[in-house]
Amino acid sequence: MAEMSAFWDRLADKYAARPIPDEGVYQTKLARTRAYFTPDMDLFEFGCGTGGTAIAHAPHVRHVTAIDFSENMLAFARDKAAKAGIGNVTFERGDITTMTVRPASYDMVLGLSILHLLKNKDAVIARVHHMLRPGGLFVSSTECIGDNRKWLRFIAPVGHALGLLPVLDIMTHAQLRNAITGAGFVIEHDWRPHPDSAAFIIARKPG
């Protein structure tokens, strides 16, 4: 975790200042996620960054636990929550693959713009399945770099070694779907607003 923490800590200021690339698409994703909410739900988000999505969802559920590798990112998230008067979000530094989480303890897990930045997405998706209650939902938005930027397969390792790029999983949309269903999930919603857009997937753990 230390390596990834250092990389994202360096980018925190720039990341926090960056506008959302497509506000309309982002709002559609929020709305489609909220369609599944009930007021008594407990949510978990990994790779929460500066906390915008966790804070946006918090008023509609009981509690959100949000983690990130980067303490600098989390500082922005905590400040945003305080300014918005949101008290039912807990921001913690952590790694979903190593932290202690009781099985079947959450109703929904969110992994947004994160699966393609992990060394082992299969292990993470399996952990998500373990964390969810029967009938729980995994909501993800993932760049499928292997569909349209295959050349990064050759550049990414060099860029990562030089500290210029994060870890990149050059997966295709089909490989992402297979990883999710292979972990035992049933995909209920799969949306790409444009052919080169991130894949927004809502998948359910059978109840």
Image: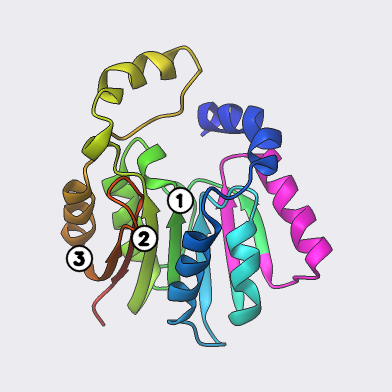
> What's the residue type where badge 1 is placed?
Ile
| Placement of 48 over or under 65, stated as above or below | above
N-terminal label among 2 and 1: 1
Q: Position of residue 65 (x, y in %)?
A: 59, 64
The answer to which image quadrant residue 57 occupies is: bottom right
Q: Position of residue 81 (x, y in %)?
A: 75, 62
Instruction: Calculate the distance from the C-alpha at mark 2 to the C-alpha at mark 1.
Output: 8 Å
Give, as a single range, the part of the protein colored magenta.
64-89
| Placement of 65 over or under 99, stated as above or below | below
**Which residue corresponds to the image point at 70% horizontal and 53% vertical from the top-left?**
77
Q: Position of residue 70 (x, y in %)?
A: 62, 39
Instruction: Calculate the distance from the C-alpha at mark 2 to the C-alpha at mark 3.
Output: 11 Å
Colouring rule applied to residues: rainbow
Disc 3: which residue: 184
Disc 2: which residue: 128
N-terminal label among 2 and 3: 2
> What's the residue type where badge 3 is placed?
Gly
Disc 1: which residue: 96
Q: Is disc 2 placed on a helix, strand or loop?
A: helix
| Placement of 163 over or under 206, stated as above or below | above
